[in-house]
Image (cartoon, rainbow, N blue to C red):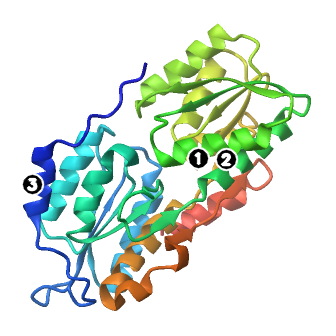
């Protein structure tokens, strides 16, 4: 059985409760002593996926004249992300955008943060918490898009295996749900879901092991950004490029190279630049205007792009423009 993340220690909850004064809800509360407002953007793992998100954060900060602390847990562990939040509250940041690693077990922590500063989620939501809004992908819809690409790759049906870091992250659960919805009633069967806990070396080991355990498997599907390159490396090492189809998520360079070479069928690409750009702009709008700035329904859907061999060159040109 996969171990669950530990419950939030009471000592940490108490520390967070004392870390900063109660947020008043006043639109000017985020300006202290005339200094530029200071926000934080917290991600959930050390993947290169976040390079574009950081570019979006920096562009928004430059346009708004604010300061932003970009934080990346190096282990992808819940306790490390908890420590980052504690540190940010001690520094009295004016708002935080976070992709929570384990939303269910972090709800108490997120509620403590929301009581002390502006809090929005991005990439992976925590809808049970007191966060003000979510900026990112409709992951169920994204999963359905992945399911459609799996069916395109396997029109006669077949057996597939899913790979992801953790299934306690909201985005992972919702992508799996969307894929299952798209495949319901078809001849495509999900044999297994393999977890790697955010360990990229383990992600490749998982793919290699499944190719041995299921030599007749028809497709491998990666749900997190690094899973695509890990699967591609395993399929190449096994000499099964073309025989084992690949569908994955996000736009890591190795994934796009694999698509251009015809080794990966498709990747479902989010808009991480927009995660960063729109999260910081939203925090600043809420800080200035109050609750009126919160979007209807509390969600900003940044959409997805399905990248295949036909549009990968144009997509890469778009990425280069975002990084300028």
Q: Which type of secondary structure does the marked residue at label 2 adopt?
A: helix
Rounded to the nearest whole Å, what is the CA distance between mark 1 and mark 2?
Answer: 7 Å
Residue carrying label 1: 174
Q: Relative to residue 239, is residue 166 drawn left or right?
A: left
Q: Relative to residue 9, is residue 145 drawn left or right?
A: right
Q: Quadrant of residue 92?
A: bottom left
| Residue depicted at 54% across the width and 71% down the height | 300
266 versus 30 height, above or below: above
Rounded to the nearest whole Å, what is the CA distance between mark 2 and mark 3?
Answer: 38 Å
Q: Nearer the viewer, mark 2 or mark 3?
A: 3
Residue carrying label 2: 143
| Residue depicted at 22% across the width and 60% down the height | 112
276 versus 82 height, above or below: below
Q: Quadrant of residue 94?
A: bottom left
Q: Are marks 1 and 2 in contact (CB under 8 Å)?
A: yes
Q: Position of residue 233 (x, y in %)?
A: 58, 26
Residue carrying label 3: 15
Q: Earlier in the sequence, mark 1 or mark 2?
A: 2
Q: Which type of secondary structure does the marked residue at label 1 adopt?
A: helix
Q: Foreground residue, 215 or 164?
A: 164
Q: Position of residue 22 (x, y in %)?
A: 15, 74
Q: Earlier in the sequence, mark 2 or mark 3?
A: 3
């Amino acid at each position: 059985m996969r171990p669950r993340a530990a419950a939030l220690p009471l000592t940490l909850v108490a520390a967070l409760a004392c870390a900063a004064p109660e947020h008043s809800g006043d639109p000017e509360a985020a300006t202290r002593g005339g200094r530029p407002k200071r926000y934080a953007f917290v991600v959930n793992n050390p993947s290169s996926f976040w390079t574009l998100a950081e570019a979006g954060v920096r562009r928004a900060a430059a346009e708004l004249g604010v300061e932003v602390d970009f934080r990346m847990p190096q282990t992808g562990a819940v306790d490390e992300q908890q420590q980052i939040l504690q540190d940010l509250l001690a520094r009295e940041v004016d708002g935080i955008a976070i992709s929570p690693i384990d939303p269910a077990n972090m709800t108490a922590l997120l509620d403590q943060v929301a009581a002390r500063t502006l809090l929005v989620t991005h990439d992976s939501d925590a809808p049970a918490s007191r966060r003000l809004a979510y900026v990112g992908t409709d992951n169920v819809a994204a999963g359905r898009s992945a399911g459609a690409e799996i069916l395109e790759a396997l029109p006669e049906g077949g057996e597939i295996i899913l790979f992801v870091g953790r299934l306690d992250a909201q985005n992972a659960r919702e992508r799996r749900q969307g894929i299952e919805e798209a495949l319901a009633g078809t001849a495509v069967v999900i044999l297994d879901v393999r977890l790697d806990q955010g360990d990229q070396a383990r992600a490749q080991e998982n793919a290699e092991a499944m190719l041995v355990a299921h030599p007749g498997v028809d497709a491998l599907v990666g749900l997190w950004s690094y899973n695509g390159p890990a699967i591609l490396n395993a399929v190449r090492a096994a000499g099964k490029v073309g025989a084992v189809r690949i569908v994955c998520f996000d736009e890591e360079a190795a994934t796009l190279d694999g698509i251009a070479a015809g080794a990966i069928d498709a990747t479902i690409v989010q808009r991480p630049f927009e995660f960063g750009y729109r999260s910081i702009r939203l925090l600043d709008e809420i800080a200035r205007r109050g609750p009126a700035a919160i979007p209807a329904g509390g969600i900003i859907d940044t959409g997805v792009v399905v990248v295949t061999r036909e549009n990968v060159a144009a997509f890469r040109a778009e990425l280069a423009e975002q990084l300028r």
